[in-house]
Image: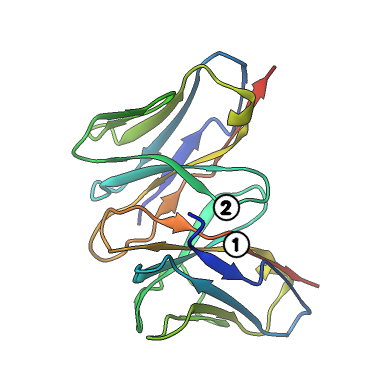
Amino acid sequence: NAGVMQNPRHLVRRRGQEARLRCSPVKGHSHVYWYRQLPEEGLKFMVYLQKENIIDESGMPKERFSAEFPKEGPSILRIQQVVRGDSAAYFCASSPRSGADTQYFGPGTRLTVL
Amino acid sequence: GENVEQHPSTLSVQEGDSAVIKCTYSDSASNYFPWYKQELGKRPQLIIDIRSNVGEKKDQRIAVTLNKTAKHFSLHITETQPEDSAVYFCAAGRGGGADGLTFGKGTHLIIQP
């Protein structure tokens, strides 16, 4: 769905730097999901957020990774002290409500760690 | 947690023939099964989905079947065309708590002219 916006589309970081990925959901959607996709692999669920709340972060590494979805503004996925293994495409998706409902994906941010 | 297996990993068919991709899931609480198509470097695009209260759903050349008892679901594409070439992912999800989708590893569909 063209309504989900992500930026930047490409991000290059050196080892040890911070990466900040932004996701603006479809207008009116209050549920955001972040997924990571490694080359030649499927998408792995990381975290599910509603406005100002983390609902499920079971797929997100405990260290260095954090996510937020503030009352105002986009959802942010933050990776501190990046390592080469963090290189991947990070997709966010949004849905209007929880439960068995359609998730619309953004174009992704391709993170490269040098 | 949920585990989704997808087969085959690569599927090559002649243009005009049918393609079938199969997935199994492990969590009987899953009740939503979408299929996504992803072209190289692009976002996953939803092509069809099915909910657990339905056994089959069709949209033009695309159909999905669901067998809740056996915990498997399949994607069927008929009269394949070159633009159907892409990677296809199945996924499973459930309402309530953890609503993140669990994806299969994908099937690279190649349509031979």
Percent position (x, y) of residue B31?
25, 47
Amino acid type, mark 1: Gly
Rendered position, B33 above or below B12: below
Identify the residue at horizontal 57%, vertical 68% (top origin): A6
Specify the label residue A108 is tagged with.
1
Identify the residue at horizontal 53%, vertical 49% (top origin): B44
Percent position (x, y) of residue A105?
49, 57
Amino acid type, mark 2: Arg
Identify the residue at horizontal 56%, vertical 76% (top origin): A22
Percent position (x, y) of residue A28?
34, 69
**Is residue B95 left or right of A108 when viewed as pictured?**
left
Crowd class of label 1 (few under 14; some 14 to 19; many from 20; radius 10 Å): many
The image quadrant where one finds the C terminus of chain A is bottom right
Q: Chain of mark 1?
A: A
Q: What residue is pinned by disc 2?
A: B43
**Is residue B94 left or right of B103 when viewed as pictured?**
left
Identify the residue at horizontal 66%, vertical 72% (top origin): A8
